[in-house]
Image (tube, coloured by chain):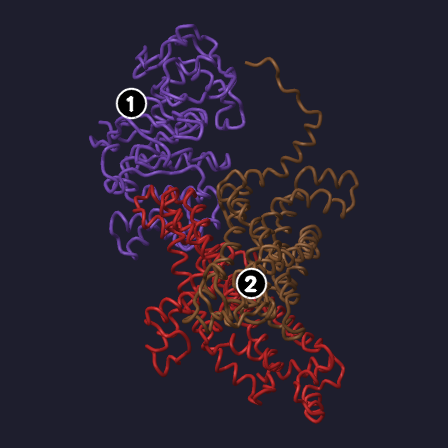
Amino acid sequence: MSLTTPVPSVHAPRSAKRSARWRVLRKALRTPSGIVGLTVAIGMVALGLLAPVIAPYPAEATDFGALLQPPSAAHLLGTDELGRDQFSRVLYGIGASVQIGLLSVLIAAIVGVPLGLVAGYFRRLDSVIARLLDVMLAFPNLILAVGLAAILGASAMNATIALAVGAVPGFARIIRGEVFRLRGLDFVSSAVAAGAGDGRVMFGHILPNASSALLVQITVSIPHAVLGEAALSFLGLGIRPPAPSLGTMLSNAQPFLQTAPWMAIFPGLVIIAITLAFNLFGDALRDALDPKGRRR
Amino acid sequence: MNVLEVADLGVTFATEDGPVVAVDRLDYEVREGEILAIVGESGCGKSVGVLSLLGLQPGNSTVSGRVSYRGEDLLTVSESRLRGLRGRDIAYIFQDPMTALNPLMTVGTQVAETLRKHLGMSKAAARERVVELLELVGIPAARERLGVYPHQLSGGMRQRVMIAMAIACDPKLLIADEPTTALDVTVQAGIIETLKELRDRLGMAIVIITHDMGVVADIADRVVVMYAGKAIESAPVVELFAHPTHPYTRGLLQAVPQRGQHATAHRLKGISGNVPVLRSTAVACSFADRCAFASDACRAVRPEPAPIAGAGHTVACLHPQTEPLLLQKGA
Amino acid sequence: MILYLVNRIGQALITLLLAVVVVFLGVRALPGDAATAMAGQEGTPETIDAIRELYGLDQPLPVQFVKYLGQLLQGDFGRSTSTGVPVNEVIARALPVTLELAVLAMLVAVAVGILLGVVAAVRQGKPAEWLVNAAALLGLSVPSFWLGLMAILLFSVILGWLPASGFVPFSEDPLGNLEHMIMPALILGMSMAAVVIRQTRAAMLESLGADYMRTAKAKGLNPREVVFGHGLRNSLISVVTIVGLQLGFLISGAVVTEQVFVIPGIGKLTLDAIFTRDYPMIQGVVLVVAAAYILINLLTDVVYSIIDPRIRVRGEAH
């Protein structure tokens, strides 16, 4: 045995508290699916952000001398009916997809978390908020997007809002459940007894302890939003052509399925890579949070 | 004539921390029409010991030894033969009737299921028989209760439904695993009484698993005291209460508060510590570390059950205690 | 039970009323004058006035709303501004098509989902579980419309087995109807099946560990009777819930699937209405979809209470 025993850190209690909070994340990153998922997800986000640097051609540059070309050295993923380089458009499309996916989930969390906190904390408001969420759920995401597109016109912004509204109930429900779980625990009761205000208890004591559940909800909502964006753009209700988006590339490809199948194959595979990565990571997080595997 | 003979029974669990021996070379037999109590602290392997008789133990365990039911070795027969025996020849009653009954099935259907499976009864015939069975186990207004769900019954009524289900096919052996533990004290006595009556009327043998010496005194003909997966003392009930010999048995008896009251909440008096976790078959006395009389020999040799004075009394101890035990109970 | 039903139906009606309010206000929130927007780009001042009068847009909002509600209750959704055909007639023609697609897809999802979910739970730790989990993960990650395009590429373009698009009513040509519907229904069903698989697996794992499963085994039932007779029924409660929640997804999915396979259902109708700015049509479609969704949720809860006697007897919402 070594004689030099490690000196206990002075900050032990604080770091212990912090490590408890990140325990779920660290546990998730010890599983292969967690590591692979997070790595690929970060890689896809990076590819999207770096699209202007990596892309060999501008996204909207047409080349009428090279229409519907199959994949080649000059055009890694071929070209479309206007001679645009599919590889470059896919890169920009990833950027748009990831941007809308992350932004809509962020908005949903910002709206949904306080709703859930209030619903769980003030029992009297619970049923009112529950009704409100029911109405939100009564309009499936896509129908909501349809309505918004009808009122405001189709745009990336409106697609983001529609997807965000669709994701709000999920956040509210998760947080509401966490409040119910946590409000009975000693540290919350003692905070209340010590005279902490409602806001302080909700945001200072309950929310930090719901952070793992929140992290899981965020992670599993992103692939949902990415798929939703792709679907909306595919229908012409999201990103408007000629701006590059994975969904519009697929709707573009539909008439050329027979002559230029690569136009349809690659954007789809890229969407799958993004959603699969986030889903893998989300599953790993969820398993870390709830080892019994009772997925809901 | 013995209904059941258990010899050298071993049950080992594969856990993340390595193997755990739950039952360690256990021997006992059950005579026809007899009520045998297997008694011991929780965690001493009582439950898994009886579950393994018919292959009902959890999946991560391995069972060894011989279990002879009327001459048939249950550990070597086929799974389909086991299914034929389960509920027909050997039936179980479990600890918590709330969770042991299917919450989504009516009481009538659950009892009838056994009849239809083993006796091939028609729906109508099974229904009539279920009414009889429910009346037999002391459920009032049995016919009206056929269509109710378990959550609509009290705990005692639920356990009576479990009993009706168990005796439906007139089994030769009934195994009751802590049948009164989850129930209110006032209900316990009624269930014990019902089990005794059923034995007298139907002539089946009963193995009752319990940690409660009060229950043992009320119902048992014979007792096997288990500790850390082993039978450490066995005797007819009167003999055991009159001459408890193993230091552990004596500790158990001293822990009994008063007759009729149950001992769950009470710690064992004079026995500090917990049942040890065994990693392999014991080579010494498992109780030595908690025993006031332990010697070096106890930690070197495993005591084997040996007959002592008194009819049918065996004990596995190097230092059997023979002086009368001063019990605190008044009567 | 009756109390529970009345209570639950009341809730559904309130939600529906709120949905009507949202749609009503949504249309009034159109940028600029709703009547001008409704008339479209070719709208002459006369048509704009006519629309304004027709919808009572010159009256105060509450009056307008009561009138609007009255029309809805009579089944009057107005006329399409692009074709002049009553909206309810158009919807009545498109709705059965979408319903057929949705019902077929749901059958696929429930059958495949429950079966594979049970397999994954019963074969825990075995290769079969791993395969099912991987399939469910893929199902969640693959966009259904892309899968649809790939299916068309394989089965229509390359193999030539099935028609790539279009629709034939069942009443005219049952076989042709199925030929056109099988691919869309399978594709739409698959993406929903993934969620059902996961829920079934999780619920079954919970049931398999329950005490009553041991009781069932101790009765002498065989593994099939134990798993399906006792385990699955208890798992179905949460599966029904998730299927109900997934129906909203099914409606959205149907819109996309109809677009991929060019099926003249509600989805196609909605998209066409948006691109022609046919507001009465959009209003009608959105309301019908919301109503359908609320009705489905109501039915889910009723089924739920039939499966779980504990809810029925308590007579209260969960």
Residue at x-position 68% and y-position 92%: C47
Marks 2 and 1 in Cβ contact (< 8 Å):
no
User: At which x and y percent is residue A122?
Assistant: 71, 52
Percent from the top left, x then y, of residue C252? Answer: 53, 68
* Residue B103 visible in the current orientation: yes
Q: Is residue C314 above or below residue B186?
A: below
Which residue in the structure is indicated by mark 1?
Answer: B8
Q: Secondary structure at mark 2?
A: helix
Which chain appears red? C
The image quadrant that residue A92 belongs to is bottom right
Task: Give the alpha-carbon distance from disc 2 to disc 1, as whole Å.
Answer: 73 Å
| Left or right, B152 with reference to C178 | right
Chain coloured brown in this rendering: A
Is there one chain holding both mark 2 and mark 1? Answer: no
Name the residue nearer the viewer: A22 or B260: A22
- Chain hosting mark 1: B
For the point 40% across and 81% down, the residue is C169
Identify the residue position indicated by label 2 in the image.
A89
Residue at the outermost front position:
A65
What colour has chain B?
purple
Residue C88: quadrant of the picture: bottom right
Type of amino acid under label 2 = Arg
Q: Is residue C316 visible?
A: no
Q: Position of residue B38 (x, y in %)?
A: 37, 26
Q: Residues within 10 Å of mark 2 (few under 14, many from 20)?
A: many
Q: Position of residue A112 (x, y in %)?
A: 66, 56
